[in-house]
Image: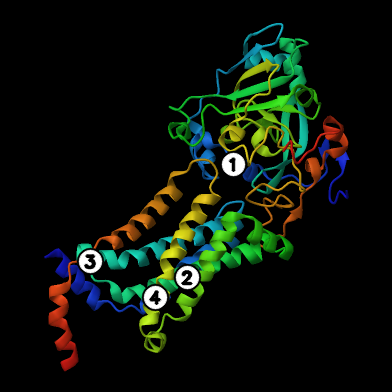
Amino acid sequence: QDMPDFTLNGYDTTEEANTFEEISSYNNFYEFGTDKGDPARYAEALTTDPWSVEIDGLVERPGSYDLADILAKVDIDERIYRFRCVEAWSMVIPWNGFELNQLLSLAGVQPSAKYVRFETLFRPEEMRGQRLPLLDWPYVEGLRLDEAMHPLTIMATGVYGKDLPNQNGAPLRLVVPWKYGFKSIKSVVKVTLTDEQPINTWKATNFREYGFYSNVNPEVSHPRWSQASERRIGGGIFASRIATLKFNGYESLVGDLYAGMDLSENY
Amino acid sequence: MITDRINGALRAIPAWPLYIIALIAPAWIFYAGVTGQLGVEPIKAMEHRIGELGLQVLIATLAITPLRRFAKINAIKFRRALGLIGFFYIALHLLVWLLLDVRILSQIVGDILKRPYITIGMAGFLLLVPLAITSNNWSIRKLGPRWRSLHKLFYAAIVLGGVHFLWQAKGFQIEPVAYLGVILALLAVRLIPRKKPAAKIRVRPNRESV
């Protein structure tokens, strides 16, 4: 597999990052509406302070963790990641955040835990999309524990050194750069360690189209469109599509997590 | 009567300016896309706007006959222009998809053959092609009664268009459901039987005497 225009410097891509404007104006966050501009238009209504995260399930220290307390105990880092949406567009985003494994260590993962389940805030009075039955609210996502512990997997708190805009999932969101964007759940309020595979929202909505793993893979088509290529946001109207890379270009870092698995079965 | 006044106004307006006015929307959409006014992903925005606009104009075309029958508003003389403009917008929607969006021939062919919503959209467009070609007085004369039968294809084409719009949406979205609902309603009212025998007898000898 050739890797055009993509080199890894540690975990960062050296590709040119999208602008703050691009990153914060073109979003899928159905909690605020289905139009790409709806999140930027309406997410201002969201109160992100105070914020706490409920961590429960198979952990040593379950409870409500105040975001400020969490941030005092983790290492915030910059990560320039590729971001590939299942709709076949992509960006390069300089996130600020900390590795998810640090958050999980705060709560202490029990040996019997196999999966992590995440939940987005449900607050229809501030999140106008939640007043419509677009999806089965609240939004749920999940990772296998080894995916969650992987150093590439982060909880983002900012972009370009600024606080995360609300439309990007403030104040705290997951970022899993080798999976389609919908796995990177926004505005997280609940993290549950479990021994059963969580049922993520898009899979529950349409299991033929969206699976649990949702690893970026140009060889496995979405039933309604090809995943072989993508359009990089910001190229204007004359830019061509670029080839989509397996695991979004992170194959050397995460490929062995899926050794022996049939990726077209486990899509 | 308000309908008389509307009909009077409609009679006074010629249909030909519609063809010129129709150029404004795509010109503006293209200009806005190039100058960054359609956001950071202008190709998708152009593709969606012109496609939705096309569907709206085609729905208006479909509404002309029921409008005359149930609201007594006669806009028949605009029907050809609306149908052709709707076709023109849908053709532009297809061109944006082909030339700006996908561009890769193998992927275009693959999408048309394998992606049901694209297959359906493409089929709807192809059904419109013979209708657009025969939307002129010469074809109506030449084809005679077959012209009417041929143009019944429009019903199938617009349903395919509505399904195409619905099928591309993710999750449950109200807008495409509403569009398809309006299309089906405009088709369903055509099934209501007409009460006509009395009028027909009186019209016949009249026409022969002309």
Based on the displayed image, in which of its 4 quarters is residue B151 positioned?
bottom left
Which residue carries the number 2 mark? Answer: B87
What crowding class fits label 3: few (fewer than 14 Cα within 10 Å), some (14-19), or many (20 or more)? few
Q: Is residue A69 left or right of residue B158?
A: right
- B109 vs B180, left or right, is right
From the viewer's perspective, is residue A260 above or below residue B125?
A: above
> Disc 3 sits on a residue from what chain?
B
At 57% across and 18% down in the image, what residue appears?
A51
* Residue placed most toward the observer, A189 or A25: A189
- Residue B42 visible to an observer of this rendering: no
In this rendering, position of residue B15 left or right of residue A26: left
Residue flagged by tag 1: what amino acid is it?
Asn
Labelled disc at residue B177: none
Farthest bottom residue in view: B209
C-alpha distance separating marks 1 and 2: 31 Å
Q: Real-space Cα distance between discs 2 and 3?
A: 24 Å
Q: Which mark is residue B69?
A: 3
